[in-house]
Image (cartoon, rainbow, N blue to C red):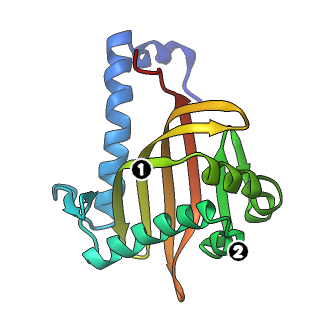
């Protein structure tokens, strides 16, 4: 424990807090990437219009992106078995402040996601794929417009999918979804 009389020198002003809060995430990313032995100075490249960071190969990036796209396609096709087959046994589905296991997702939210995906088209606008050995993540945005349960939908969404390379290919280990309403163009 730091003695009380010494804590005054550790206090930060508002300007210093802002600078510190901006530097911490960048520093953590730099440290983590350096510890993994990856060169953080390399710039993203493009594969089929999708930004990717250097990885083992561009085929890894393509394979990872294909799994995420296939997951969304299986939802839109009402293929729950296909969707679940792309998820790791210990996957975490994070949405709306909740965290669900694979079994919880299968028994509760999967059918609603299928119904929504079938009713309302979603246009994926951008994706960034990063592959680091046997782990990868895909960050993407989307716009969803249509009608669901007699309710107009006009939302912007973001998704982060984390995947790992398994014996039978890439599996989704975690998905985090968030969205917000878009204002209609007047």
Give the percent coordinates (x, y) of residue 123: 43, 48
N-terminal of the pair, mark 1 or mark 2, is 2
Provide the residue designation for mark 2: 81
Give the percent coordinates (x, y) of residue 58: 26, 74
Residue depicted at 35% across the width and 60% down the height: 129
Q: Is residue 109 left or right of residue 170?
A: right
The mark found on residue 38 in the picture is none
Q: Residue furthest right?
A: 107
Which of 149 and 160 lies nearest the eye of the viewer? 149
Which of 2 and 142 lies nearest the eye of the viewer? 142
Residue depicted at 38% across the width and 10% down the height: 14
Residues at marks 1 and 2 touching, judged by CB atoms closer than 8 Å:
no
Provide the residue designation for mark 1: 124
Give the percent coordinates (x, y) of residue 118: 63, 54
Quadrant of the frame with the N terminus: top right
Instruction: Look at the numbered disc 1 and give the secondary structure of its residue.
Output: strand
Alpha-carbon span between mark 1 and mark 2? 23 Å
Q: Is residue 24 above or below residue 108?
A: above
Quadrant of the rendered image containing residue 61: bottom left
Residue depicted at 76% across the width and 57% down the height: 111
Instruction: Look at the numbered disc 2 and give the secondary structure of its residue.
Output: helix
Q: Is residue 80 left or right of residue 69?
A: right
Q: Is residue 43 above or below residue 157?
A: below
Quadrant of the rendered image containing residue 27: top left
Q: Is residue 118 left or right of residue 18?
A: right
Residue depicted at 52% across the width and 48% down the height: 121
């Amino acid at each position: 424990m730091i003695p009380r009389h010494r804590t005054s020198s550790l206090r930060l002003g508002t300007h210093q807090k802002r600078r510190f809060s901006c530097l911490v995430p960048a520093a953590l990313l730099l440290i983590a990437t350096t510890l993994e032995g990856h060169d953080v100075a390399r710039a993203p490249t493009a594969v089929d219009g999708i930004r990717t960071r250097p990885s083992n190969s561009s085929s890894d990036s393509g394979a990872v992106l294909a799994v995420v796209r296939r997951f969304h396609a299986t939802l839109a096709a009402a293929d729950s078995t296909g969707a679940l087959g792309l998820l790791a046994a210990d996957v975490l589905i994070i949405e709306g402040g909740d965290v669900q296991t694979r079994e919880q997702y299968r028994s509760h939210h999967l059918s609603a996601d299928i119904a929504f995906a079938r009713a309302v088209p979603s246009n994926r606008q951008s994706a960034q794929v990063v592959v680091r050995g046997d782990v990868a993540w895909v960050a993407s945005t989307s716009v969803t417009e249509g009608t669901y349960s007699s309710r107009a939908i006009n939302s912007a969404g973001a998704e982060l999918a984390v995947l790992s390379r398994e014996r039978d290919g890439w599996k989704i280990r975690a998905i985090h979804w968030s969205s917000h309403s878009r204002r209609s163009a007047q």
